Image: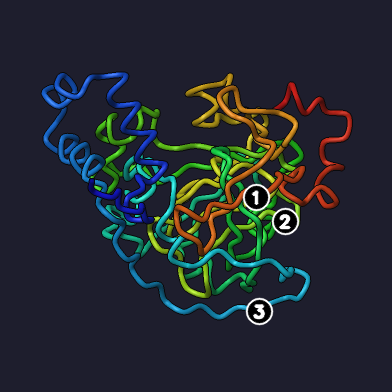
């Protein structure tokens, strides 16, 4: 009688591929789906079933920054290859490996960010000017995805409040709206709804003014001491560590101060699942899974999965809980 071979990490289907394959089979049926998709989408579907590994992320350029001790807590960093190789960026595909595989050609030279709306001095800055104008800091932040996984990431950036103050907000500025680049030629998910998850692009997000002005809120231009790679939101992205990751909009081209609450892409897509506030809260579950604990993305393989309890406001309650005093966090999820 033959003996069964012992399973190793190499035999395990990655969790993200497993769930996506099930979704494709259940919702479409393999044969019908394959016949009805574009050639690009068919190639993506084949890649999912083949389980191709993520490629190495393109290298970034070294940045000059300070390292204030108050932003360097004693937390174990997520390995850089996991931070750059395991991402959600639906403009480049639904799988966690797709951004690293498909975003490498994103053109960021001459990138500009426009700040307007309820401001006295609308401004447009290019990315080089932004990096020179604002002193950069490295900050180690917890990162919590709404999908119940987490990382610890050393971002390099500056407080969003510095940029907002430069535009001199008026007294009518109550919210801050953000928009990602819209360029279907570079972002395949924007031109193919199968690749991009059927979201309405460009990706948009928003914060209350007090959230945007909070010292924890960053505009990041780098990670691990280098400029952001495309899959992590190059050349500039939002970081709000007490909120779920989908609030941390990537590849920003427009910031607009508004009187009314701005739209949020995932809230528009599924308002019963993704709220405007998106504060990390272990006591309010997602309709399809618990938020009480999280899978830690660390140095271990697929057979060495660790979970830990989710912290209120992702561990930043002492800094941000006062922003929501009197607000029903279950209703305003």
Q: Is residue 204 visible?
A: yes
Residue under numbered circle 1 = 240
Tell me which residue sits at (52%, 46%) in the image: 249
* Residue 308 % position (x, y): 67, 49
Q: Earlier in the sequence, mark 2 or mark 1?
A: 2
Q: Earlier in the sequence, mark 2 or mark 3?
A: 3
| Local SS, label 2 | loop
Residue under numbered circle 2 = 216
| Local SS, label 1 | loop
Looking at the picture, tell me which residue is in the foreground, 13 or 168.
13
In the image, residue 216 above or below residue 33: below
**Contact, mark 2 vs mark 1 (Cβ under 8 Å):** yes
Residue under numbered circle 3 = 66
Q: CA distance from mark 2 to mark 1?
A: 7 Å
Tell me which residue sits at (87%, 42%) in the image: 322
* Residue 268 % position (x, y): 51, 24
Q: CA distance from mark 2 to mark 3?
A: 16 Å
Looking at the picture, tell me which residue is in the foreground, 94 or 29.
29
> Label 3: few (<14), some or many (≥20) within 10 Å?
few
Task: Name the side, left or right, on which 35 lies relative to 87.
Answer: left
Q: Which mark is residue 84?
A: none
């Amino acid at each position: 009688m033959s003996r069964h071979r012992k399973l190793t990490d190499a035999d395990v289907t990655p969790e993200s591929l497993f769930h996506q394959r099930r979704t494709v089979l259940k919702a479409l049926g393999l044969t019908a789906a394959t016949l009805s998709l574009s050639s690009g989408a068919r190639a993506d579907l084949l890649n999912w079933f083949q389980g191709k590994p993520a490629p190495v992320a393109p290298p970034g350029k070294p940045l000059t920054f300070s390292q204030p001790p108050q932003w360097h807590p004693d937390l174990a960093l997520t390995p850089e290859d996991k931070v750059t190789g395991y991402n959600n960026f639906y403009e480049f595909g639904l799988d966690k490996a797709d951004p690293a595989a498909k975003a490498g050609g994103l053109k960021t030279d001459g990138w500009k960010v426009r700040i307007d709306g309820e401001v006295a001095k609308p401004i447009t800055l290019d990315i080089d000017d932004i990096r020179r104008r604002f002193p950069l800091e490295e900050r180690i932040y917890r990162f919590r995805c709404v999908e119940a996984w987490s990382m610890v990431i050393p971002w390099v950036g500056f407080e969003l409040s510095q940029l907002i103050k430069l535009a001199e907000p008026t007294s009518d500025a109550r919210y801050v709206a953000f928009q990602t680049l819209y360029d279907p030629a570079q972002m395949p998910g924007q031109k193919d709804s199968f690749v991009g998850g059927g979201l309405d692009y460009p990706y948009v997000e928003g914060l209350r003014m007090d959230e945007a002005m909070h010292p924890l809120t960053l505009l990041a231009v780098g990670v691990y001491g280098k400029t952001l790679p495309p899959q992590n939101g190059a050349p500039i992205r939002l970081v709000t560590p007490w909120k779920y990751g989908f609030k941390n909009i990537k590849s920003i081209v427009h910031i607009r101060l508004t009187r009314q609450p701005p739209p949020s892409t995932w809230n528009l897509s599924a308002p019963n699942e993704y709220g405007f506030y998106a504060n990390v809260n272990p006591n309010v579950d997602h309709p399809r899974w618990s938020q009480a604990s999280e899978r830690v993305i660390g140095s271990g393989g697929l057979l060495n999965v660790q979970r830990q309890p989710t912290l209120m406001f992702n561990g930043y309650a002492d800094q941000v809980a006062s922003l929501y005093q009197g607000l029903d966090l279950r209703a305003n999820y």
